[in-house]
Amino acid sequence: MAQETSRQLPDEAQVLGWMESLSNWGRWGDDGQLGCLNLITPAKRQQAAALVKDGIPVSCDRPISTGMHADVTFQVQRFMVDSGEGRNEDSVERQYTRRGAAEFIGMVFHGQSITHIDAMSHYSWQGHLYNGKPAQMITSREGAQTHSIEAAYSGIVTRGVLLDLPKLRGVDYLDPNEPVVRMVTDMLKDMKLVPDIKPSGGGTDANQMRLNGIDCIVVGMATNEMHTVDEYVVVPDLMATAHLCQNLMNPNQ
Protein backbone atom coordinates (compact mmCIF):
# COMPACT_ATOMS: atom_id res chain seq x y z
CA MET A 1 0.00 0.00 0.00
CA ALA A 2 1.12 3.59 -0.54
CA GLN A 3 2.70 5.23 2.45
CA GLU A 4 1.24 8.35 3.97
CA THR A 5 3.29 11.42 3.12
CA SER A 6 3.50 14.89 4.57
CA ARG A 7 4.86 16.38 1.35
CA GLN A 8 2.89 19.22 -0.10
CA LEU A 9 2.50 19.77 -3.79
CA PRO A 10 4.41 22.83 -5.02
CA ASP A 11 2.23 25.70 -6.11
CA GLU A 12 2.19 27.11 -9.63
CA ALA A 13 4.59 29.93 -8.79
CA GLN A 14 7.17 27.46 -7.52
CA VAL A 15 6.89 25.27 -10.61
CA LEU A 16 7.25 28.30 -12.87
CA GLY A 17 10.27 29.32 -10.80
CA TRP A 18 11.89 25.98 -11.60
CA MET A 19 11.95 27.04 -15.24
CA GLU A 20 14.62 29.53 -14.17
CA SER A 21 16.39 27.82 -11.26
CA LEU A 22 16.67 24.43 -13.01
CA SER A 23 17.34 25.79 -16.49
CA ASN A 24 20.26 24.46 -18.53
CA TRP A 25 20.29 27.53 -20.77
CA GLY A 26 23.89 28.69 -21.19
CA ARG A 27 25.32 25.62 -19.41
CA TRP A 28 27.20 24.56 -22.55
CA GLY A 29 27.58 27.98 -24.13
CA ASP A 30 25.08 30.53 -25.32
CA ASP A 31 24.97 29.12 -28.86
CA GLY A 32 24.67 25.44 -27.93
CA GLN A 33 21.86 23.40 -29.47
CA LEU A 34 22.45 19.92 -28.00
CA GLY A 35 21.30 20.51 -24.43
CA CYS A 36 21.79 17.45 -22.22
CA LEU A 37 23.13 15.47 -25.17
CA ASN A 38 26.40 17.19 -24.21
CA LEU A 39 26.52 14.75 -21.30
CA ILE A 40 27.02 11.90 -23.78
CA THR A 41 30.77 12.36 -24.20
CA PRO A 42 33.12 10.09 -26.21
CA ALA A 43 34.18 8.54 -22.90
CA LYS A 44 30.53 7.81 -22.05
CA ARG A 45 30.03 6.14 -25.44
CA GLN A 46 33.09 3.98 -24.91
CA GLN A 47 31.84 3.02 -21.48
CA ALA A 48 28.43 2.13 -22.92
CA ALA A 49 29.92 0.09 -25.77
CA ALA A 50 32.02 -1.90 -23.29
CA LEU A 51 28.83 -3.14 -21.64
CA VAL A 52 27.60 -4.94 -24.78
CA LYS A 53 27.56 -8.72 -24.33
CA ASP A 54 25.22 -10.28 -26.86
CA GLY A 55 25.14 -7.62 -29.58
CA ILE A 56 21.42 -8.17 -30.24
CA PRO A 57 19.79 -5.11 -31.86
CA VAL A 58 16.32 -4.01 -30.75
CA SER A 59 14.58 -1.87 -33.32
CA CYS A 60 12.64 1.24 -32.31
CA ASP A 61 10.89 1.51 -35.65
CA ARG A 62 7.16 1.40 -36.20
CA PRO A 63 5.46 0.29 -39.43
CA ILE A 64 4.21 3.19 -41.54
CA SER A 65 0.48 2.78 -42.11
CA THR A 66 -1.62 4.79 -44.53
CA GLY A 67 -4.84 3.70 -42.81
CA MET A 68 -6.75 5.52 -40.11
CA HIS A 69 -6.31 3.69 -36.82
CA ALA A 70 -6.91 4.66 -33.19
CA ASP A 71 -3.31 5.78 -32.67
CA VAL A 72 -2.92 7.66 -35.99
CA THR A 73 -2.95 11.42 -35.38
CA PHE A 74 -2.39 12.54 -38.98
CA GLN A 75 -2.99 10.17 -41.88
CA VAL A 76 0.10 9.34 -43.93
CA GLN A 77 0.01 10.25 -47.63
CA ARG A 78 1.54 7.76 -50.04
CA PHE A 79 1.57 7.26 -53.79
CA MET A 80 3.80 5.47 -56.26
CA VAL A 81 5.94 7.63 -58.54
CA ASP A 82 6.58 4.55 -60.66
CA SER A 83 5.86 0.87 -60.10
CA GLY A 84 6.62 -2.47 -61.68
CA GLU A 85 3.16 -2.76 -63.22
CA GLY A 86 3.12 -3.22 -66.98
CA ARG A 87 6.86 -3.77 -67.26
CA ASN A 88 6.41 -7.03 -69.13
CA GLU A 89 4.23 -5.26 -71.67
CA ASP A 90 6.66 -2.38 -72.36
CA SER A 91 8.55 -2.28 -75.59
CA VAL A 92 12.11 -3.57 -75.54
CA GLU A 93 13.44 -0.02 -75.75
CA ARG A 94 11.20 1.07 -72.88
CA GLN A 95 12.29 -1.86 -70.74
CA TYR A 96 15.89 -0.68 -71.06
CA THR A 97 15.04 2.74 -69.58
CA ARG A 98 12.19 1.89 -67.18
CA ARG A 99 13.91 -0.24 -64.57
CA GLY A 100 13.29 1.36 -61.17
CA ALA A 101 10.32 1.80 -58.85
CA ALA A 102 9.82 4.75 -56.48
CA GLU A 103 7.22 6.09 -54.08
CA PHE A 104 6.29 9.32 -52.31
CA ILE A 105 5.50 9.32 -48.58
CA GLY A 106 4.29 12.44 -46.77
CA MET A 107 3.74 12.45 -43.03
CA VAL A 108 3.49 14.58 -39.90
CA PHE A 109 6.25 13.15 -37.72
CA HIS A 110 4.85 14.35 -34.41
CA GLY A 111 2.15 11.74 -34.08
CA GLN A 112 1.69 8.66 -31.97
CA SER A 113 2.51 6.17 -34.70
CA ILE A 114 5.60 7.62 -36.41
CA THR A 115 9.09 6.89 -35.12
CA HIS A 116 10.81 10.22 -34.50
CA ILE A 117 13.00 12.28 -32.17
CA ASP A 118 11.81 15.67 -30.93
CA ALA A 119 14.30 18.39 -31.79
CA MET A 120 14.94 21.40 -29.56
CA SER A 121 12.83 23.40 -32.01
CA HIS A 122 9.75 21.35 -31.08
CA TYR A 123 8.96 23.39 -27.96
CA SER A 124 9.29 27.01 -26.92
CA TRP A 125 8.82 28.74 -23.58
CA GLN A 126 7.44 32.25 -23.45
CA GLY A 127 8.35 32.80 -27.09
CA HIS A 128 11.89 31.45 -26.81
CA LEU A 129 13.64 28.20 -27.67
CA TYR A 130 16.51 26.60 -25.72
CA ASN A 131 19.24 29.10 -24.89
CA GLY A 132 16.90 32.02 -25.51
CA LYS A 133 16.70 31.86 -29.28
CA PRO A 134 13.46 33.43 -30.57
CA ALA A 135 10.72 30.97 -31.51
CA GLN A 136 10.16 33.07 -34.65
CA MET A 137 13.21 31.34 -36.14
CA ILE A 138 10.91 28.37 -36.76
CA THR A 139 9.17 29.54 -39.93
CA SER A 140 6.44 28.16 -42.14
CA ARG A 141 8.55 28.62 -45.26
CA GLU A 142 12.01 27.50 -44.16
CA GLY A 143 11.24 25.31 -41.14
CA ALA A 144 13.71 25.25 -38.24
CA GLN A 145 16.40 27.88 -38.81
CA THR A 146 17.98 26.84 -35.53
CA HIS A 147 17.77 23.95 -33.04
CA SER A 148 16.82 21.44 -35.75
CA ILE A 149 17.32 17.70 -35.39
CA GLU A 150 20.43 18.10 -37.55
CA ALA A 151 22.25 19.17 -34.38
CA ALA A 152 22.21 15.47 -33.39
CA TYR A 153 23.67 14.40 -36.74
CA SER A 154 26.28 12.15 -35.10
CA GLY A 155 23.59 9.99 -33.52
CA ILE A 156 22.77 9.16 -29.90
CA VAL A 157 24.78 6.28 -28.46
CA THR A 158 24.86 5.78 -24.69
CA ARG A 159 23.95 3.40 -21.89
CA GLY A 160 20.30 2.60 -21.26
CA VAL A 161 18.63 1.07 -18.20
CA LEU A 162 15.59 -1.18 -18.64
CA LEU A 163 13.53 -2.28 -15.66
CA ASP A 164 11.81 -5.48 -16.79
CA LEU A 165 9.39 -5.97 -13.90
CA PRO A 166 7.45 -8.91 -15.42
CA LYS A 167 10.69 -10.84 -15.96
CA LEU A 168 11.80 -9.98 -12.42
CA ARG A 169 8.56 -11.45 -11.08
CA GLY A 170 8.62 -14.46 -13.41
CA VAL A 171 5.40 -13.62 -15.27
CA ASP A 172 4.52 -12.74 -18.85
CA TYR A 173 2.74 -9.50 -18.00
CA LEU A 174 1.57 -7.36 -15.09
CA ASP A 175 -2.13 -7.39 -14.32
CA PRO A 176 -3.97 -4.87 -12.11
CA ASN A 177 -3.44 -7.12 -9.05
CA GLU A 178 0.35 -7.07 -9.35
CA PRO A 179 2.03 -5.20 -6.47
CA VAL A 180 3.71 -2.61 -8.72
CA VAL A 181 0.38 -1.77 -10.37
CA ARG A 182 -1.42 -1.63 -7.01
CA MET A 183 1.33 0.58 -5.63
CA VAL A 184 0.80 3.13 -8.39
CA THR A 185 -3.00 3.01 -8.19
CA ASP A 186 -2.95 3.28 -4.39
CA MET A 187 -0.70 6.31 -4.56
CA LEU A 188 -2.98 7.93 -7.11
CA LYS A 189 -5.98 7.29 -4.87
CA ASP A 190 -4.12 8.83 -1.92
CA MET A 191 -3.68 11.90 -4.11
CA LYS A 192 -7.45 11.98 -4.68
CA LEU A 193 -6.97 10.92 -8.32
CA VAL A 194 -8.91 8.16 -10.08
CA PRO A 195 -6.64 5.66 -11.87
CA ASP A 196 -7.73 4.62 -15.35
CA ILE A 197 -6.04 1.34 -16.35
CA LYS A 198 -6.16 0.67 -20.09
CA PRO A 199 -3.92 -0.55 -22.93
CA SER A 200 -1.65 2.12 -24.36
CA GLY A 201 -2.64 3.28 -27.82
CA GLY A 202 0.90 4.05 -28.95
CA GLY A 203 3.47 6.82 -28.77
CA THR A 204 5.55 5.52 -25.85
CA ASP A 205 8.82 3.64 -25.50
CA ALA A 206 6.83 0.98 -23.67
CA ASN A 207 5.10 0.07 -26.92
CA GLN A 208 8.44 -0.67 -28.56
CA MET A 209 9.45 -2.81 -25.58
CA ARG A 210 6.15 -4.66 -25.77
CA LEU A 211 6.68 -5.36 -29.48
CA ASN A 212 9.98 -6.94 -28.50
CA GLY A 213 8.39 -9.20 -25.89
CA ILE A 214 8.75 -6.94 -22.85
CA ASP A 215 5.41 -6.06 -21.21
CA CYS A 216 5.29 -2.64 -19.56
CA ILE A 217 3.01 -0.24 -17.77
CA VAL A 218 2.91 3.48 -18.48
CA VAL A 219 1.94 6.16 -15.97
CA GLY A 220 0.90 9.36 -17.68
CA MET A 221 -0.66 12.62 -16.56
CA ALA A 222 -0.56 16.31 -17.46
CA THR A 223 -0.20 16.06 -21.26
CA ASN A 224 -3.24 16.53 -23.47
CA GLU A 225 -3.66 16.25 -27.24
CA MET A 226 -0.19 14.69 -27.25
CA HIS A 227 1.94 15.12 -30.38
CA THR A 228 -0.55 17.35 -32.13
CA VAL A 229 -0.45 21.07 -32.89
CA ASP A 230 -2.93 21.53 -30.01
CA GLU A 231 -0.74 19.79 -27.40
CA TYR A 232 -0.73 21.43 -23.97
CA VAL A 233 0.27 20.68 -20.38
CA VAL A 234 -1.90 21.35 -17.34
CA VAL A 235 0.46 22.69 -14.65
CA PRO A 236 -1.42 21.25 -11.61
CA ASP A 237 -1.39 17.83 -13.29
CA LEU A 238 2.32 18.23 -13.98
CA MET A 239 2.89 18.97 -10.29
CA ALA A 240 0.85 15.90 -9.36
CA THR A 241 3.02 13.83 -11.70
CA ALA A 242 6.14 15.10 -9.92
CA HIS A 243 4.58 14.18 -6.57
CA LEU A 244 3.74 10.70 -7.83
CA CYS A 245 7.29 10.20 -9.12
CA GLN A 246 8.66 11.23 -5.73
CA ASN A 247 6.51 8.65 -4.00
CA LEU A 248 7.42 5.93 -6.50
CA MET A 249 11.13 6.56 -5.98
CA ASN A 250 10.79 6.73 -2.21
CA PRO A 251 7.76 4.54 -1.34
CA ASN A 252 8.83 4.05 2.30
CA GLN A 253 9.29 7.71 3.15
Image (cartoon, rainbow, N blue to C red):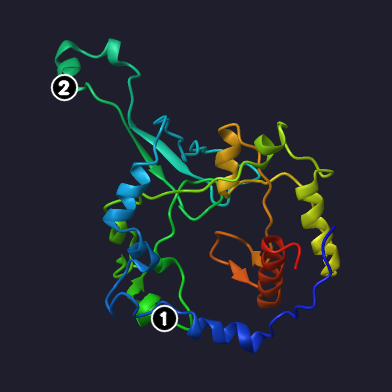
Residue that label 1 marks: 128
* Helix, strand or loop at mark 2: helix
**Whole-percent x, y for residue 110 in the image:** 49, 56
Residue 37, how many percent across, how many down?
36, 62
Q: Position of residue 235 (x, y in %)?
A: 66, 77
Q: Residue at x 47, y 41 (%)?
A: 60
Q: Residue 15 carries which label?
A: none
Residue 164: quadrant of the picture: top right
Whether residue 124 is situated above or below residue 187 in the rendered picture: below
Q: Where is residue 228 in the image (x, y as percent from the top left)?
A: 55, 61
- What amino acid is at disc 1? His
Q: In the displayed structure, would residue 208 be above or below residue 110?
A: above
Asked which quadrant contains residue 183, the reply is bottom right
For disc 2, the marked residue is 97
40 in relation to 106, above or below:
below
Specify the amino acid type for callout 2. Thr
Identify which residue, 203 or 157, lies in the foreground. Answer: 157
* Separation of marks 1 and 2 at Cα, in angstroms: 52 Å
